[in-house]
Amino acid sequence: MNRAAVALVLMLSTSPEAAPPSPWTEQHSREILEKTQTIRLDTDLSPLAPGERAALSKLLEVGKIFQDIYEESRHPRALALRKQIESQQTPLAEQQRTLYRLFQGPIANTLQNERLPFLPTDPVVPGKNVYPWGITKAQVQAVLEKHPGLQASLLAPRTLVRRADATSLRQDLGTLERYPVISGLHPGLIEKLRALAKKPDPALLYAIPYSVAYAPQMTKAHGLLWEAAHAVEGDDAEFAGYLRNRARDLLSDDYESGDASWVRGRFRRLNAQIGSYEVYDDELFGAKTFYSLSVLIRDDAATARLEKGLQGLQSLEDSLPYEPHKTVSSDIPVGVYNVVADFAQARSTNTASILPNDPLHARRYGRTILLRSNIMTHPNLFSNGRTLWEAVVAEPFRAHLGPSGGFNRTLWHEVGHYLGVDRDVQGRSVNSDALEENSSALEEMKSDLVSLYIGKQLRERGFYDDTTLRELYASGILRVLQVVRPRRDQPYQTMQLMQLNYFLDQGLLELRPDGLHIHYEKYPEVVGKLLREVLAIQRAGDKPASDRFIDQYTRWEETVHGALAARMRAQQKYRYTLVRYSALGE
């Protein structure tokens, strides 16, 4: 279905822009860089057949295209600033290039958890560059209240919103005329834009598909994916079929064919996450997806061991504290992989993914889980976590943190996205539509809690022994510790702080002079109570109730949270991690 119908809305004026700040000094930049560690992923490519190697090369080229789009979609001056600092040969420019690579743009997240430009440019805005720069949520909501029928097109996951001025309309009409294939995949769009162009009005807004907004890039990516498919056809016909389908998806902005062949495909060695899926960067409505690409090589032995533990998911679903339960497939495509390279929104120390998010596609085809082994098990990253753990946990509990805990919590967190509420009582997706910008925080918290809640059942099945169950529970505590006060626009840190406060309130955690004490006997009950509340809010789809719930559990007290954070910061060697990839020649 084409969800990119043009949206006409009354556009309210925005406030004048302030003058860009001065670039950071070398000293200011050094404060962050001294807290940054670099890890290099040198994934073994020797298992790949010649055709797979050729396909890999094409996929890396697509990743570079997505990287540019991602940076541009978050800030309108990102690419120009990147080009500027790439041409300079000074110590400060070298620092700026590293900061740009770390933060994927000109906006840094400081040690004080503030987002500030380190180059002379505009500060970040909630809608990034996929809405008119600087427009507010209140302005858009006022329009939607007057024109409720426009919401589906204006807030479609893969559309970019523009002002209906003559320049923008002329640009988009020119694009559709130059790229007739894209125009044909979006019937009626060119006629609507022509109607607008007869009387352009900057006080209006319209929405265009990503494939139109980024037509040259998507056309090139489409061609590269077809070339990759041709190269790999003889070695892995199913993977080639997926690449061809996803190539078409990039031009149609409808991912169903690619999602079906991706989730249900049985690939040999290579896998790739390709497209725009996650809404974390949209702080205005949590509606717009952003591009990412990951190229991965499957670890067959680790995957085989894992698949044996994923039987009987329906009984786990039925045990969750909500009604009505849904029917889930036990045949979840899951794999353990080593990352070759990540691009755009996927470029980080992200340990796993479960996609697609579209509830219709998930119901029809399921979802695929990609576990990133060489990130999850990287010794530097585990060491960082242990440092924080030992800084605040009382001595009798310090030995409880083990490497299996993080792996298993991540695995069952991703399965947790597959379980529980997926639509509210009105049929809206809990991933974005129902709770708007709160959706991500509550969905991630639900999955965190599911991974802990089902621990006892998995122990009874023999998936865990007493030691690995305790390591799971310890990992659940490490997960919620905060070294700085979270911002409300940080979904992961927000839901982690909420869990920390709930655990303290319910006595699962107790802060004593010698550090945090863990009352493991309370773990199942406390986690179950919080999970019940989260599932109820998701099921109701009540945005004001979700606001109140988040406000209730995001308190920050300097004598408690501030004191714990100070202890961790005093011992923490690194706050940031820059990932480099040998496959990119880094």
Image (spheres, rainbow, N blue to C red):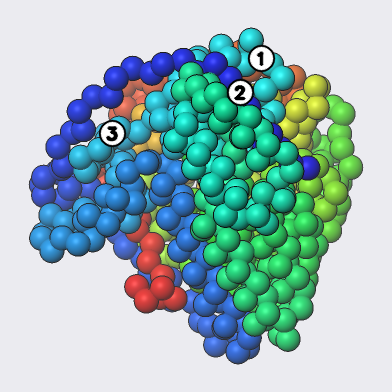
Gap between marks 1 and 3, in whole Å? 31 Å
Residue identified by numbered label 2 = 8
Q: Is residue 307 above or below residue 546?
A: below
Q: Are marks 2 and 3 in contact (CB under 8 Å)?
A: no
Residue contact between numbered discs 2 and 1, judged by CB atoms under 8 Å: yes
Labelled pair 1, 3 in contact (Cβ < 8 Å)? no
In the foreground, 354 or 434: 434
Q: Is residue 92 visible?
A: yes
Q: Quadrant of the C terminus?
A: bottom left
Pinpoint residue 404: horizontal percent, then vertical percent: 57, 59
Tell which tag, 1 or 3, sits nearer the viewer: 1
Task: Tell me the CA gap for discs 2 and 1.
Answer: 9 Å
Name, please, the residue furthest toward the front: 198
Q: Of tags 2 and 1, which is closer to the observer?
A: 2
Q: Residue at x 77, y 73 (%)?
A: 238
Q: Quadrant of residue 568?
A: top left
Give the percent coordinates (x, y) of residue 549: 58, 17
Q: Which badge, 1 or 3, comes first in the chain's sequence?
A: 3
Which quarter of the rendered picture does the N terminus lie within? top right
Any mark on residue 164, and which? none
Q: Measuring 65% from the left and 40% from the top, which residue is drawn there?
A: 190
Category of crowding for the residue at label 2, using alpha-carbon neighbours closer than 10 angstroms: few (below 14), some (14–19), many (at least 20): many
Residue 122 numbered mark, or none: 3
Q: Secondary structure at mark 2?
A: loop
Q: Residues within 10 Å of mark 1 (few under 14, many from 20)?
A: some
Residue type pointed to by label 3: Asp
Residue found 69% across the figure and 28% down from its top = 152
Label located before the other in sequence (2 or 1): 2
Residue identifier under label 1: 147
Q: Secondary structure at mark 3?
A: loop
